[in-house]
């Protein structure tokens, strides 16, 4: 293993050296000619490339496709793609929206805006929330499915999603657009979305722009009401939502130079409920994020130097005020206020060098994350008054990492004309993390063009996911021991991904098929700890004895996910196009008794909160939670140059959800329950009134099917939405 790591490290440094210094011997071939690429993707290889030539499972979604399909949210867009499942997209607006790519966890996919990660460093697992990100100002969405840690670092086990904003592609002069969307999704429930953009591009390449986006929702009751007792006191409320984006940017673009600077502020106000099936009329969340991104690039025929990066800060404040509990006007006399802060700094430099039969990239990144939290609780009950506060500011919680990466792509013709069509890409990343030290990842990505239309590809890649700041440093401990919830000895989760795929593109017809397998080791688990001197059978049996020793995060278990993605687009005639997308996912997790590392747990009994099992023997858990197999069939009909309509049938397979089971151990733990399969039928259309005005509609869940995404939470019934867009420039 040491030899393998040494080889990868040497390869990474060698490729970096190749990029920085010019080759001693020039190839006897002409330079790569300039190409006017109308449609390119960057995230898959960190270079601009035509999508159909890339030997990876990729998806490129343009602004035109977003508007023509009448997508309302980022979750809408992503859930329509094969291999991607979003949970929360069809629930009350503002609800947390989680992303699962190829069956991996919600914190195993990198989400970026213009190359800067969008995460919540103050949350438990640092996963992003899709409901925070709107489609305002998005020019295209690049999706790379499968492990990409050698290029994008931590979290890129399931894949990468990069949202590219509409910057230098403006036309000269004034650029203005106005979008109005209105949706009705239940009795007294509606949503209004207003999106205003204004910019100006000068003849010399300079441009400035700004955008304001507001979403206001009068929502539904976010939880399911199961209380049937007519005498029970119920004061259920509707859960409203407000979201605002304010964006400003400036830059300069020419044939060789590109400079941009963009700032974005997001404000959200969300009504929350306590938990599944449990309403709360006085639980509010306020969230704000400040995002700054920048880019500087110089490009000629052979070389490109780019500097990119940004800074993001976020604050999340949740207040759960006292609630009325009976007809007599009594309140539960509890008040909880939680305040969380987080920041993320990302800086990177990259050099690209292109030749006729090979190209190489190399670069380095610096990342730093911080978090803090302040909590206050007040409760007045029959047992007396209770107050408690906690403040993590003084702990100065942070991590940083420095990485170097490189990727070399070789054309088979470099070696022999008989290898025409073969491309081999190899890459590596060496990361030095402030907490767990050095980490190496690699990628081996051969592909072969069978002809101009078809390509076979394979990808073998390792990945990793860093522990969150909370998992590392959470200081809470139980009075019977000094064991903290946070575990600074945590190792990163590591993965190995295998993928084999085929893609064929012929005019408007496309076929994409990929078979994949991902094994994730060192899974970070939340566990209960119990007194090692008491047998498991006797834990909690004596009320005079406190057997509990606290809770903690540990590395335990290996999760294996495998599946197949299929997407087909076929033009039946010059008016009608059919699309089929299918994603089949299966997985299991295996725990071994040897996973019980006693360094942090001090030899105490370890009980997994995720399933209630004790780590005393090998355990295998079948299935994945909230990660279903999915399918979609779509028909798009063009009536004329001005009018097109679309029908989508989306099928979501049965899957497991979690719930708290008090019978699992002394304190209880999570158990699983099946959530039924459901099918949704949507109908949408867009009409071009003239070169500047477009009108659209969407009828969602046309059959008004009753279904569930998360156990105990409501979903949208039949929805009706209308949109009207004005754009000064043609779109």
Image (cartoon, rainbow, N blue to C red):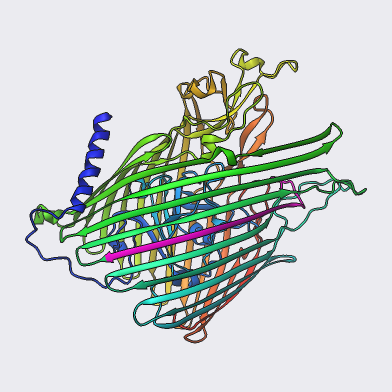
Quarter residue 214 falls in: bottom right
Q: Position of residue 78 (x, y in %)?
A: 49, 58
Q: Tell whether position 199 is magenta.
A: no
Residue 689 in the image, given as x and y percentages of width and height: 52, 85
- Of 720 and 298, nearer the camera is 298
Q: Nearer the viewer, residue 317 or 590?
A: 317
Q: Is residue 269 left or right of residue 35?
A: right
Residue 243 picture quarter: bottom right
Relative side of 443 to 727, left or right: left
| Left or right: where 565 falls relative to 119 | left
Percent across and percent down for residue 1 are 28, 29
> Against 304, is 627 above or below?
above
Toward the bottom, the furthest residue is: 690
- Residue 718 visible (yes or no): yes
Q: Is residue 276 visible?
A: no
Q: Main secondary structure of the magenta part?
A: strand
| Residue at figure coordinates x 75%, y 58% from the top left | 238
Question: Who's the residue at 30% across and 61% down the image?
Answer: 504
Q: Which residues are magenta?
A: 274-298
The quadrant in which residue 131 appears is: bottom right
């Amino acid at each position: 293993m040491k030899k393998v790591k040494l080889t990868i490290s040497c390869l990474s440094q060698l490729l970096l050296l190749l990029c920085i210094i010019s080759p001693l011997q020039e190839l006897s071939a002409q330079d790569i000619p300039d190409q006017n690429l109308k449609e390119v993707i960057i995230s898959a290889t960190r270079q601009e490339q035509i999508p159909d030539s890339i030997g990876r499972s990729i998806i490129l979604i343009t602004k035109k496709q977003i508007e023509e399909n009448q997508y309302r949210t980022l979750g809408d867009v992503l859930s329509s793609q094969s291999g991607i499942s979003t949970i929360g997209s069809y629930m009350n607006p503002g609800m947390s929206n989680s992303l699962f790519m190829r069956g991996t966890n919600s914190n195993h996919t990198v989400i970026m805006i213009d190359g800067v990660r969008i995460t919540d460093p103050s949350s438990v697992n640092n996963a992003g929330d899709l409901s925070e990100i709107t489609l305002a100002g998005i020019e295209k969405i690049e999706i790379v499915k499968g492990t990409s840690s050698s290029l994008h670092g931590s979290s890129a086990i399931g894949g990468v999603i990069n949202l590219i904003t509409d910057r230098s592609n403006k036309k000269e002069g004034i650029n203005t657009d106005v979008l109005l969307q209105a949706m009705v999704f239940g009795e007294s429930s509606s949503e209004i979305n207003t999106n205003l953009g204004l910019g100006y591009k000068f003849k010399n390449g300079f441009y400035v722009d700004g955008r304001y986006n507001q979403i206001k929702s009068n929502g539904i009751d976010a939880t399911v009401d199961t209380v049937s007792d007519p005498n029970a006191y119920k004061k259920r409320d509707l859960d409203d939502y407000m979201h605002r984006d304010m964006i400003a940017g400036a830059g300069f673009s020419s044939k060789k130079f590109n400079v941009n600077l963009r700032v974005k502020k997001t404000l959200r106000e969300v009504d929350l409920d306590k938990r599944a099936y449990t309403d709360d009329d006085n639980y509010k969340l306020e969230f704000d994020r400040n995002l700054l991104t920048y880019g500087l690039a110089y490009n000629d025929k052979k070389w490109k130097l780019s500097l990119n990066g940004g800074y993001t800060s976020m604050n999340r404040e949740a207040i759960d005020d006292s609630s009325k509990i009976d007809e007599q006007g009594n309140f539960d006399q509890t008040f909880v206020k939680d305040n969380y802060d987080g920041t993320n700094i990302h800086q990177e430099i990259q050099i690209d060098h292109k030749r006729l039969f090979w190209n190489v990239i190399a670069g380095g990144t610096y990342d730093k994350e911080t978090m803090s939290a302040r909590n206050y609780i007040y409760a007045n009950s029959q047992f007396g008054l209770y107050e408690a506060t906690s403040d993590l500011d003084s702990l100065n919680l942070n991590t940083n990492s420095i990485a170097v990466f490189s990727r070399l792509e070789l054309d088979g013709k470099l070696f022999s004309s008989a290898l025409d069509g073969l491309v081999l890409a190899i890459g590596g990343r060496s990361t030095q993390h402030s907490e767990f030290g050095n980490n190496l990842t690699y990628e081996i990505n051969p592909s072969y063009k069978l002809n101009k239309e078809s390509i076979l590809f394979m990808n073998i890649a390792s990945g990793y996911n860093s522990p969150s700041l909370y998992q590392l440093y959470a200081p809470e401990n139980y009075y019977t021991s000094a064991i903290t919830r946070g575990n600074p000895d945590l190792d990163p989760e590591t993965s190995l991904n295998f993928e084999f795929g085929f893609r064929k593109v012929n005019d408007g017809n496309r076929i994409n098929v990929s078979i994949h397998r991902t094994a994730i080791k060192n899974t970070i688990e939340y566990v209960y700890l119990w007194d090692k001197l008491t047998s498991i059978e006797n834990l909690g049996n004596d009320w005079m004895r406190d057997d509990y020793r606290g809770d903690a995060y540990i590395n335990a278990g290996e999760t294996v996910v495998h599946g197949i993605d299929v997407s087909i687009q076929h033009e039946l005639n010059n008016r009608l196009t059919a699309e089929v997308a299918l994603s089949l996912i299966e997985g299991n997790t295996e725990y071994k008794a040897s996973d019980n590392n006693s360094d942090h747990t001090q030899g105490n009994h370890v009980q997994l909160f995720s399933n209630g099992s004790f780590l005393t023997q090998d355990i295998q858990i079948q299935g994945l939670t909230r990660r279903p197999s999915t399918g979609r069939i779509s028909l798009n009909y063009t009536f004329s140059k001005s009018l097109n309509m679309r029908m989508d049938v989306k099928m979501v397979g049965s899957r497991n959800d979690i719930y708290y089971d008090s019978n699992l151990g002394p304190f209880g733990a999570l158990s699983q329950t099946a959530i039924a399969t459901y099918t949704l039928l949507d109908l949408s259309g867009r009409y071009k009134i003239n070169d500047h005005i477009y009108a659209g509609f969407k009828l969602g869940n046309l059959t008004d099917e009753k279904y569930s995404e998360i156990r105990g939470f409501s979903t949208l019934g039949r929805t009706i939405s209308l949109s009207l867009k004005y754009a000064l420039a043609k779109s």
